Structure formats: C-alpha cells, structure tokens
Image (cartoon, grey):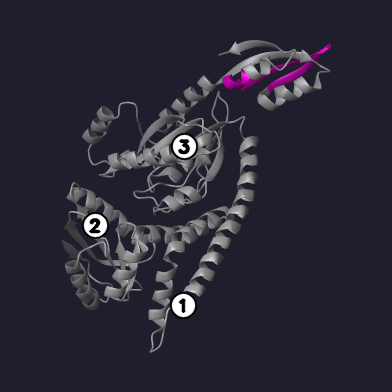
Amino acid sequence: MSYYNTPPDHPEERVCLVGVRLRGSTEEDVRENLTELEQLAETAGAEVVAVKVQKRARIAGSTYVGTGILESLATLIEDEKINVVIFDDELTPAQARNIETRLKVNVIDRTELILDIFSRRARTRQAKIQVEIAQLTYALPRLKRLWDHLSRQNGGIGTRGPGETQLEVDRRRVRERISHLKKDLDKINKRTAERRKKRKEAYNVTIVGYTNAGKSTLLNRLSGSSVLESGKLFSTLDSTSRRVSLVGAEDFVLTDTIGFIRKLPTHLVASFRATLMDVEEADLLLHVIDASSPGFEERIDVVNNVLKKVLENNGDGGKDDPAHTIMVLNKVDRLKEKAEGKSLGNRYSDALQISAATGEGVDELLSEIKKSMEKEFIEADMEVPAKAGKLISVIENLAKVRDRKVEGELMTYRVSIRRSDLGRLESAGDIVVKIVRR
C-alpha cells in the first residue's frame, strides 16, 4: 500500500514514511501511527511526499521490510527525489545499515526523529543535557553505521571506514561523555529537588497527557499566565509551574509536564526521569485528553502505561501508584455535535468535559480541585510553650501558619496542615492541638 503527496516546489528534506502492518494489527492502527509519524516529520521541518505500508507476518530480520518493497522504494526515491526515509519503528543498527546500503539515502527511525525534535525544542540546561544523554545512548551501538555513512558521503577510491581501534576510541569517548553529562544532570536534579521541598507545603497539581492535548493551554487558563502554546508536538519539554489562588481555599501549585506519545523511546523515559518526578510528587493529577481526536482512547492507555513505567522505575522508595487523578476531556468545543459530548459523558462518567481554549467547564474543574484539596488539609489551633524553639520550628516547617500570637507563656497558632503531617506534629512534644475544620 502506498500514497503520495504533491511535491513542494523547493523542498529541503523530501521524506518517505515506511510502516509495517503485522498480523493481528488493524489498518486503522497503522494509519494512526503513520499519521502521527507524518506530524512528527513535519514538526522536524521535513516535507512528507510519500507513505508506504507493507503487510507482513513478521519483521524481516536484516532489512525490517522485504526485498520487494525495498526495490519499489529505490525507484520511488529516484522518481520523487526523496532524500530521507523514515521507518515507524526503531531499527536495529544492522537493519538501518543494510537499508541505507540498498537505498543510498539517509535512513532514520521514529526514535531518531523524536530525539531530533527534542534536541530542537530543548531550552533549559536540564532539558538539553537530558536530550543529549538520550541521543548518545541511542547512538552508541550505531557508531559503526555512522562511520560507514560518513565514508560513503566522502566517496572516492580507497575510502575506508575507520579501523576497529578508532571505533573503540569513539565508543570510549561517548561513554565518558554520557558519564560526565549524568554527573552534571545529578547536580541540577539536586537543586530541582530542593526547590520541590520548598513548595512541599503547597498542594501540588500536575498536568499530564498526550502531546498536543492542550496541557499548556489549560495551565494558562487556570493560572492566568502565558506559557507557549504552539499547537505543535512536544512544545513543552521542561516542567513549568505556576501558583494558583482559589477563593476560600489554599493556593496550589500547578505544573505542566512533557507530553507523551506512542512508542516513546525508552532512552527518553530514562533521561527525563527527573522532569517526570513532578508526576511522583503530585497530590493530584489532571489527565488531559484531546476529546476531539478520533484515537483518544488509545492515547489514554499510552499515557497510563508511561505513568506506570515512571513509577515502577522510581528507584528511590517513592510512590508505586499514581496520585488521585481527574480525567479531563479537553477541546469539547471542537466536537461536531452535542450528541458526541453526551456519548463521552456516558462512556466516561467520572471525567470532566472542558475547553481550555474557551473556558467552558473550567469552573467545575476548579471546584473539583478545591474538593480534593479540602480532603488533604485540615485547619487547627495549636498551643506550644513560647520558649520551646524546636517545637515552634516543627510547627512552622510542617504547617502553613494563618495566625500566630503570644499569650503569656504560650505561643498560639491557627494553621492549615496536611493530614499526613498532623501525627508527626502531635508526636513532636508538648503541643496542644484543637481541630477547627476536618
């Protein structure tokens, strides 16, 4: 199966996408994957001029696809002046090398494409380091292919790839670079962890979801800020936090996170572990879904699976289960008929339907956030000896102080405190606690 787009007048990178429909997968699955791959290619600045799909019982070990499709690709490349072929799945180093030898053009896979986009999108030092670690980890087993590719580009009689000694030198340098970057990242992560500790007393709400689901738009809507909303894939790589005030309730910290995607490279999940810590530290997750997207049910599963992977690999004794989650069906203003919204309500009765762009349903979402906060915090009056400096320090570290005053030999407080911290406070010493509001 194949189809073509009209070629542009002055293309920079003319691309053909290649996918495989294996036994057990549907045509719709393949179409959605390749539509997303096309969006990724366009995000990277390429022009997709053709897409080819092959039905197979299994992946061809040496070339991913069969000989027949490689021959048709070679003809297509010449006819359409294609200079890049992108495969929808991650290729082994040998597969990529063999395909490039046959096609004589640059061959990349979905993983390499995503890494390229991340490299372009990275703005902060933390994001840049995380992306470089992922890129080098991906490149390490592929160094020989990269050298072969450079050798072919240089061309000429007597041109050879590097000797094994040079390859080993390069491999060692890459490993040393990865080690150096990881040390730098650890330092940044420690500073980030300190900042998280400082905001620990606040209620933390973290936005998660598939890329381009409208997460940044929701952050802007709830916080009144102006974070970039590009409408492109992976416009957010760094977590962005804003403090949000609610009438008659505590302030809360709202954090937008990196969007997820099908077949998210494992190198990226590992490298962005620190960024995704916001998921683990959250008191409440807002799972934002583009309800106008035809394949949003599968995207829900993708996000849930990545969240599970993040928590399973926390490696530091953190949470094993995600925080309480509110499912937010966004972009309902784009639904063609009211009946679609009603159908969504029947299928996802616990979900909230909103439009972050227009504000529809946002008040109800804020109300649900407020209810969730009220379950987490209690209000209490406390008395402690005025000279008990250590106890006073415990109170002011664990609780948000509403009011304090000295009455004779006592210091009295009105505080808001997490239920989980109340026991620690009561066991700290000579503190009298009276609950005002549960």
Number of residues whose C-alpha sits closer than 10 Å to that of mark 3, classed few (under 14), some (14–19) or many (20 or more)? many
Give the x, y percent position of residue 124.
57, 55
**Secondary structure under badge 3?**
helix
Q: Which amino acid, by three-letter code, is at mark 3?
A: Leu
Mark 3–mark 2 distance (CA, rounded to whole Å)? 31 Å
Q: Nearer the viewer, residue 297 or 428?
A: 428
Mark 1–mark 2 distance (CA, rounded to whole Å)? 30 Å
Precedes in sequence: disc 3 or disc 2: 2
Which numbered dot is residue 162?
1
Q: Up-down: is 170 above or below 361?
A: below
Q: Which residues are magenta?
A: 402-422
Of discs 1 and 2, which sits in the foreground?
Answer: 1
In the picture provided, is 346 more to the left or to the right than 305? left
In the picture provided, is 234 more to the left or to the right than 341? right
Q: Main secondary structure of the magenta part?
A: strand
Precedes in sequence: disc 1 or disc 2: 2
In the picture provided, is 70 more to the left or to the right than 241? left
Name the residue rendered at 30%, 74% in the picture. 101
Which numbered dot is residue 311?
3
In the picture provided, is 147 more to the left or to the right than 175? left
Residue named by callout 2 = 59
Mark 1–mark 3 distance (CA, rounded to whole Å)? 42 Å
Can you say which quadrant of the picture contains the C terminus?
top right
Of discs 3 and 2, which sits in the foreground?
Answer: 2
Give the x, y percent position of residue 159.
41, 85
Can you say which quadrant of the picture contains the N terminus?
bottom left
